[in-house]
Image: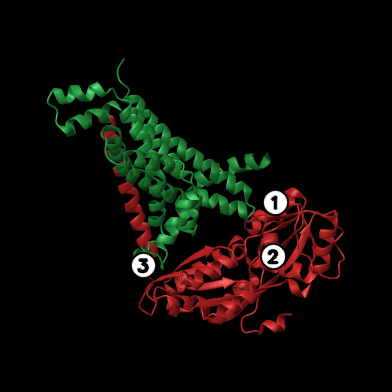
Amino acid sequence: MDLIIDGIVQAFWLVVRGDPDVMRVIYLSLLVSGSATLISLFIGVPLGTLMALSRFRGRGFTLSLVNTGMGMPPVVVGLVVSILLWRSGPLGLLHIMYTPAAMVVAQVIIASPIVTGISMAAIAQLDPRLRMQMLGLGASRWQMLWVLFQEARLPLLTALMAGFGGVISEVGAVMMVGGNIKGQTRVLTTATVLETGRGEFGIAIALGIILLLLAYLVNLTLTHLQQQGRPQQ
Amino acid sequence: MRTIVRLFILGGMLVLALSTIGCASGSKQDTPPPSGPKETGSKEVILATTTSTYDTGLLDMLLPEFQSKTGYLVKPIAVGTGHALAMAARGEADVLLVHAPEDEEEFMRAGNGLDRRLVMHNDFFLVGPPDDPANIKGSRNAAEALAKVEQARAIFISRGDDSGTHKKEKEVWVKSGIKPSGAWYQESGQGMGETLIITSEKRGYTLTDRGTYLALKKSLNLAVLLEKDPILLNIYHVIQVNPAKSPAVNSAGGKALAEYMVAKETQELIGSFGVDKYGEPLFTPDAGKNENELK
């Protein structure tokens, strides 16, 4: 128990003092997981919308892939991305193994199915008559989509939050493709693993608390936006 | 709708800002000092090493100095020795700092390494509950101690991860003539730090390297029960990966780091590492010595 209290005190001081190592780790966590979430948004929202609105060949198969992908173990993603990005791998020429770019790639693969799945549910639950009405009123395809996104903005924000939550807390893939290199690819989760291995439980708890606070702040901001955009009663 | 647009603008700005900071701080770090690498080629050196050199903090002390001296950017990947050797054999690393002499020799015979040099040593020892239920204290050697653990069916936690420490443990079991199996023999599959914590919690026995044990000692309820058996010597070598294995191997960088590890100033740093924190050095520098002299 004293370890947890010790951790809370240490977390406070690490943040207040602005410890450069910890700041770098926080910054990298936000950069990697933020970029990965944003990219997966650009992949997942259009894909989810397409799957919700159209019937195409292989839709059932894609659907099962997306649903499986939502529960994909990060370590498997880490292993596959490693094999692809290693020097001897097919994408070795890119030279991005053990860099933040590799971590973003892995996290995009983890977050995209989550964003896709939730976006699809968000769009699919809209009243189909709305679409008919829009088209009937002479809206172009893009205008119609725009209105649908507006209507589904609350669940779409949930997709964003779920995607971000999935990757900021993930450790297996970033450990494998990033290598947990100090100052280069060390993020909050891998730093927590390392400090635990070193027996520095206080610091490990402190990093965990900072991670929670960060996730809380991001979600607080998003929830605030979400509530602001709530339909007027 | 305004919300979504605002959100995207906000997100975009955040990523932009972050990447600008990233580039700024990244370029600051990447700029080679005036005495940058003489050879043209990649500045990135991948060092595959064991968890023990990392968990103790030794590399955190040595690598920044090497980087500022030479302008290379080292990426230390801390894995078990088995994993490190396998990575290097595929050309995924440029230089190795490992501690499994027999496997290293096989690695060299296979033509995977160019140059294998002795860097330092410390020792392994057996730890267990302070009251020593299997009564291994006072055994003549490590093999006898393990035989007692097996007889008492006391819990023994093995690394089980093909690391240098795990290989050493298997070597001692072979010497004792026992094939350990049963509910008392458990594999953690994790690094030395985690394995020590598990051993302490389960009141078991395990084989550990000195460095990791000293680094974690304060949070463990384990005592050193058998040490100083010659078989328990823990010897670290640095090996430059043979660039013929893969065109991607950074041979100049690997060579520079291997030479740095055995340089006089580095060896002095290694010899003093840990004295301030633990009252004793964690490693004994050995560059230039013969491996047989240590035994």
- Whether residue A225 is visible, yes or no, is no
Q: Is residue B217 above or below residue A170?
A: below
Residue at position x 85%, y 56% in the image = B152
Quadrant in which the N terminus of chain A appears: top right
Q: Is residue B179 above or below residue A135?
A: below
Instruction: Judge depth for marks 3 and 2 and give the one in front.
Output: 2
Q: Where does the image place residue B194, in percent across and percent down from the top left?
A: 65, 54
Residue picked out by circle 3: B31
**Secondary structure found at label 1:** helix
* Chain of the residue displaying label 1: B
Q: CA distance from mark 2 to mark 1?
A: 15 Å
Quadrant in which the C terminus of chain A appears: top left
Q: Where does the image place residue A157, in percent across and percent down from the top left?
A: 35, 32
Sequence-first tag of 3 and 2: 3
Residue picked out by circle 1: B198
Three-letter amino acid code at disc 1? Ile
Disc number for residue B209: 2
Q: Nearer the viewer, residue A95 or B218?
A: A95
**Secondary structure found at label 2:** strand
Q: Are marks 1 and 3 in contact (CB under 8 Å)?
A: no
Q: Colour of chain B?
A: red
Three-letter amino acid code at disc 3? Thr
Residue A48 in the figure: left or right of residue B113: left
Asked which quadrant contains residue A160, the reply is: top left
Residue at position x 75%, y 49% in the image = B202
